[in-house]
Image: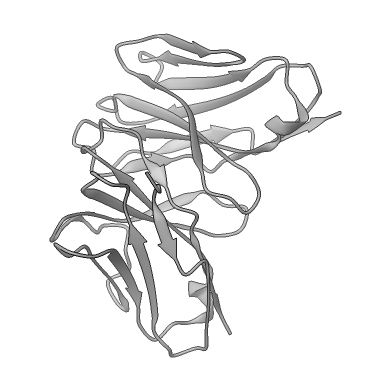
């Protein structure tokens, strides 16, 4: 089955700096890659996603890049703010869609 | 749209008791996924169901755990004879179509086994 690895497990940045979280996947058939943000004690919420026919997608301060050849995708947050502090999960899904495979999460702390 | 509803939010059980976790998907969604999350860990897939069918239960322990999604009513994750190791947050997510649509998560049920 699919194996999604996520790095780093923890990340601290100064407010205003950029944050980058990286994920790799193993199944070349995976074609959908969402990112979820989970604040403490709350539900995971989708923040951005990308499909395999696209190399990059941007939504305001958040962007995701996908390298299908290398089988890795990354989340970029620019001009970080304290409210960006949360745990971020990447995921991969194959066309059959029976499972979404999640990374182990990155705990992001934005220091004011 | 009320979103994905899970209840109870917190559930306390003693070892050997049964735990029943409920999930009502978003309106119009017919696909339900259950995930388990331990503190400071990721989301571990347990089971994927469509109405009246279990599609993939490869992540669910063979013993003590079962899941259903009946034609009417919520999806139920049932854990029999709970043990302390079952303590975790259990999240349900729903999707309108298989794998090609966004997953929407419920607020989770925090199960504590005493």
Does A32 sit left or right of A14 as displayed? left
Question: In the image, is residue B71 above or below residue A78?
Answer: below
Question: In the image, is residue B88 above or below residue A38?
Answer: below
Going 29% across and 28% down the picture, which residue do you hit? Answer: A30
Quadrant, the N terminus of chain B: top left
Q: How is the image coloured?
A: one colour
Question: In the image, is residue A42 above or below residue A91?
Answer: below
- Name the residue nearer the viewer: B88 or A73: B88
- Name the residue nearer the viewer: B2 or B70: B2
Question: In the image, is residue B20 above or below residue A108?
Answer: below
Quadrant, the C terminus of chain B: bottom right
Rendering coords of residue A59 (x, y %): 52, 14
Identity of the residue furthest to the right in this view:
A112
Does A68 sit left or right of A40 as displayed? left
Rendering coords of residue A48 (x, y %): 47, 24
Going 30% across and 30% down the picture, which residue do you hit? Answer: A27
- Name the residue nearer the viewer: A12 or A27: A12
Does A57 sit left or right of A1 as displayed? right
């Amino acid at each position: 089955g699919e194996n999604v690895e996520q790095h780093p497990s923890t990340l601290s940045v100064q407010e205003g700096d950029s944050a980058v979280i990286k994920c790799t996947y193993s199944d070349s058939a995976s074609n959908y890659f969402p990112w979820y943000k989970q604040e403490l004690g709350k539900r995971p919420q989708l923040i951005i996603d990308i499909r395999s026919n696209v190399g990059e997608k941007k939504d305001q301060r958040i962007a995701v890049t996908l390298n299908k050849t290398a089988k890795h995708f990354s989340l970029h947050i620019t001009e970080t703010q304290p409210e960006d502090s949360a745990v971020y999960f990447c995921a991969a899904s194959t066309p059959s869609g029976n499972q979404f495979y999640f990374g182990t999460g990155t705990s992001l702390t934005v220091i004011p | 749209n009320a979103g994905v509803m899970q209840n109870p939010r917190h559930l306390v059980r003693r070892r050997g008791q049964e735990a029943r976790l409920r999930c009502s998907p978003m309106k119009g969604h017919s696909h339900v996924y259950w995930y388990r999350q331990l503190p400071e860990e990721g989301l571990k897939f347990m089971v994927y169901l469509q109405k009246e069918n279990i599609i993939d239960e490869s992540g669910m322990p063979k013993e003590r755990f079962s899941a259903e999604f009946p034609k009417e009513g919520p999806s139920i994750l049932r854990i029999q004879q709970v043990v302390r190791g079952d303590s975790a947050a259990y999240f349900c997510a729903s999707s309108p179509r298989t794998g090609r649509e966004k997953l929407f998560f419920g607020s989770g049920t925090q199960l504590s086994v005493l």
